[in-house]
Amino acid sequence: MERMKDEINQRLLQLCEPLKAGKVKEAMIYSLLAPGKRLRPLLFLTVLKSYQLDYHPYMDIACAIEMIHTYSLIHDDLPGMDNDDLRRGRKTCHKQFDEATAILAGDALLNLGVNIILETSLNDALKLQLAYLLYQASGVNGMIYGQQQDLYFENHKASLEQLQDIHKHKTGELISVSLQMAACIAKTSDIEHWKQIGYDLGLAFQIQDDILDVTASTEQLGKNAGSDYENHKSTYVTLLGIDESQNKVEELFEKCYERIYAMQINHGLILELFIKILKRVS
Amino acid sequence: MERMKDEINQRLLQLCEPLKAGKVKEAMIYSLLAPGKRLRPLLFLTVLKSYQLDYHPYMDIACAIEMIHTYSLIHDDLPGMDNDDLRRGRKTCHKQFDEATAILAGDALLNLGVNIILETSLNDALKLQLAYLLYQASGVNGMIYGQQQDLYFENHKASLEQLQDIHKHKTGELISVSLQMAACIAKTSDIEHWKQIGYDLGLAFQIQDDILDVTASTEQLGKNAGSDYENHKSTYVTLLGIDESQNKVEELFEKCYERIYAMQINHGLILELFIKILKRVS
């Protein structure tokens, strides 16, 4: 898993090298290469491996997914949005550089993802399918909708159902599409399983975030702990308490495991990654 | 020309209709449908017509170009960038809605352009080529680089050569690629002509903007007049004066006409549009 992560990081850097020098390029690399989990590209590549496929020809697709995720973090952290100072253990992009550079670096990463997919040597139909899936999931009907709703519910009390809808869009869509894109490459009929696994994992991941916001330190998280509490934000923890939230996380992981076992794949690899996520402390 | 513009506006609205309801969708439509010139889609469609092609099958490509242009306006107007209150005769997006919504609406338009191109019924190879051209021109090696340099030279004196480089990237690339995409559809060997026409027209357009900033009223422009002067910004007018700048505009248009006449196309249509641009007062 660590080797795969190193390969992703190396390729992310290589893909930025041909870009015109300047503050925007520096900011893109700064945010992309910050010590993150690389969860989405790891999921994508591990699903490919679990179908016995060589994942190397698809490394650039993995990087495009991470670029979309990183652009969303940069923009979400902006003063006009969540106004965060710390991310992945470092100053946020607009704190390290400036607001204009952070806006442009986010735009540039969103933009670069398209060209990276289109420049791969995959066949035309597959490129189109992958680009379409990724940009649908991250667009105004997916991730952007989730962020819109998240901002709205900063000042309004959310029900559990509404929270679930936010998380499905803000986090679930991109995680789910990372799995679906791999299934699409593997030409498997398991795609519906992966889609649902993605939504369940995304929700579990987000509830973990709600729990960690209360139980972990800023140092552990690499972002400001306790911020939900300070902002009086509705979270799984404020609505259900920590124990119930933890139960919900485990229940969602169980659902994922069931679906994983229902498929004819190499289960070991993907389960290893899921258990790592389940046990995460940051 | 007016009919073509109406068709563009209608289709822009239609393409936004399937989006999930919310403030971001409202903001996208608000900025897209503001009374702009639709210069880039009109250029694209008119070049198609000048090759005797029916432009209707390519209307969505024209709309994708306008979406990219509009996203760039929304983000450039943000407080962290140029901090403008007025655009296309209306409040800027973040003034009408709020900053977070404007950031997301820009992101969403940049994102939507991809899917619109991928959803057309054109053949796969052409879709890929058009998406690649458009996202290259508007990315960090193109339009985004131009905005980065423009911001830098707000606080630094620029030479004429540096100004030209900013305009080439910030304005020239997207205008040039609108023409190139049409040439690509027409399968013509004229593509190099159109590329250069685009750069020359983009530069002429930008010098006109510099002149109009001094000579036109805020009401005429639909954005704040005199802002370059107030910001002590280097422009063609501050470096060359109004008369010399006007001469430069006419010289660039002459270069465009020469190239247009060198091609085997229906010259009348495209010249009509160029003359309209040359004579613009807003």
Image: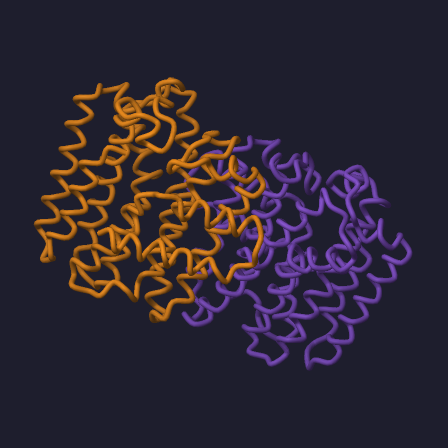
Chain colours: A orange, B purple
Q: Residue B109: in sight, yes or no?
A: no
Q: Position of residue B144 (x, y in %)?
A: 58, 52
Name the residue at 70% across, 76% down. B266
Question: Quadrant location of residue B46?
Answer: bottom right
Query: Eyeballing the image, is A103 above or below A212?
Result: below
Q: Nearer the viewer, residue A32 or B166?
A: A32
Q: Where is residue B146 in the image (x, y as percent from the top left)?
A: 64, 54
Name the residue at 56% across, 37% down. A99
Left/right of residue B24 with respect to residue B180 in the rendered view: left
Q: Nearer the viewer, residue A181 or B125?
A: A181
Q: Which of A90 and A245 is in front in this view?
A: A90
Name the quarter where the C terminus of chain A is drawn.
top left
Given the current orientation, which residue lies at the most extreme right position?
A: B243
Query: Eyeballing the image, is B149 above or below B56?
Result: above
Left/right of residue A258 with respect to residue A121 in the rendered view: left
Query: Eyeballing the image, is A194 above or below A199?
Result: below
